[in-house]
Amino acid sequence: MNLTTCALQYIAQLKKECRYSSAHVYSQALRSFTEFCKTNEVRFTQINRDNLKAYQYYLIEERNLKMNTVSTYMRMLRSLYNIGTDKGLAKPVYRLFHEVFTGVTTEQKKALPVRDVHALLFSEVKDPVLKRTQKLLNVMFMFSGISFADLCLLKKSNLKNGILQYNRVKTKSPVSIELFNSCQLYLNSLLNKRPSIPGKPDYLFSILSGNYSKNDDNYYTEIQSKLHQFNAHIKKLRCICKITDPVSSYSIRHSWATIAKYRGVRIEMISESLGHQSIKTTQTYLKGFNLDERSKVNKKNYYYVKDYTGL
């Protein structure tokens, strides 16, 4: 069995487990490396030190990819190669990926200055589509920088008595958020008003159609399509607000964390509020923060941006 066949089997398994995001990344990495090798099927022997260094050069110089994308592709290839060695299909090679980049770089600025976050959330907007986009961005910030995927997959059952409780799609970490008054003002115009249909997901917001289950390939495709559309609207909003830095849905999440850190909020609190699984060693001996503590941080973060004057 070659690497391509092994990879396709693993990707199929990921989809069976409803891990469509991971399946998509592995598929992208496989397609990219296959194009580089200029072959229909890749052999395990084609993953060697010389080829990997040449592939990294190809991604950076010819494909103009960012280093974090290069790292993602390399890590996916490493994972597939390890699967091959576990199955006896590939020969174990000590530090095979040592000479290529598999880390994370912070070269690309993702967090926005507070003045830009303020402009993005509170500038006067007339276009109804962009106005709705702005409302969703406000909700994302008020929900402690919730990711777009988590936002659009929220169910009505996740919100009870002013408390939002859900598990992150990416990490499965539980997150609890207490809604404050400003949240309710935005929610009233954004909530899904469609009647519940037995057997169909009853989403909190009408971002997704609700026509697909997690076992359907169209489920992940629709999320990606809506994310692409949402980011396109954010770019238009960015132009109206005269923001020069790149902006995407992820900017809100990163900015929420950065503003909280600037205000002196402990990194453990930020990590827990975001539903991260990082700082594992620290979190093993730190007690969890209660909902009241996290609610105060989230509320102060939002009004710090809202009341920004630039002085």
Image (cartoon, rainbow, N blue to C red):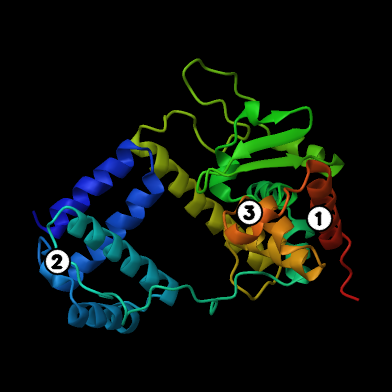
Closer to us: 108 or 1: 1
As measured in the structure, the alpha-carbon distance from the residue carrying label 2 to the one carrying label 3 is 37 Å
Residue type for callout 3: Thr
Of the image marks 3 and 1, the number of the one nearer the N terminus? 3
* Residue 83 vertical position relative to residue 188 in the rendered view, above or below: below
Tag on residue 111?
Answer: none
> Which element carries disc 2, helix, strand or loop?
loop
Amino acid at pointer 1 = Tyr
Say whether residue 139 is left or right of residue 52: right
Residue bearing mark 2: 91
Contact, mark 2 vs mark 1 (Cβ under 8 Å): no
Determine whether the residue tagged by mark 1 lies in a helix, strand or loop.
helix
- Disc 2 residue type (three-letter): Lys
**Residue underneath mark 3:** 284
Residue that carries the numbered disc 1 in the rendered image:
302
Tell which of 7 and 218 is nearer to you: 7
Quarter residue 302 falls in: bottom right
Up/down of 124 relative to 289, above or below: below
Left/right placement of residue 305 relative to residue 273 reads right
**x and y percentages locating residue 109 in the rendered image:** 59, 75
Label 1: few (<14), some (14–19) or many (≥20) C-alpha neighbours in 10 Å: many
Front-lying residue, 144 or 184: 144
Q: Position of residue 20 (x, y in %)?
A: 37, 44
Q: Nearer the viewer, residue 10 or 285?
A: 285
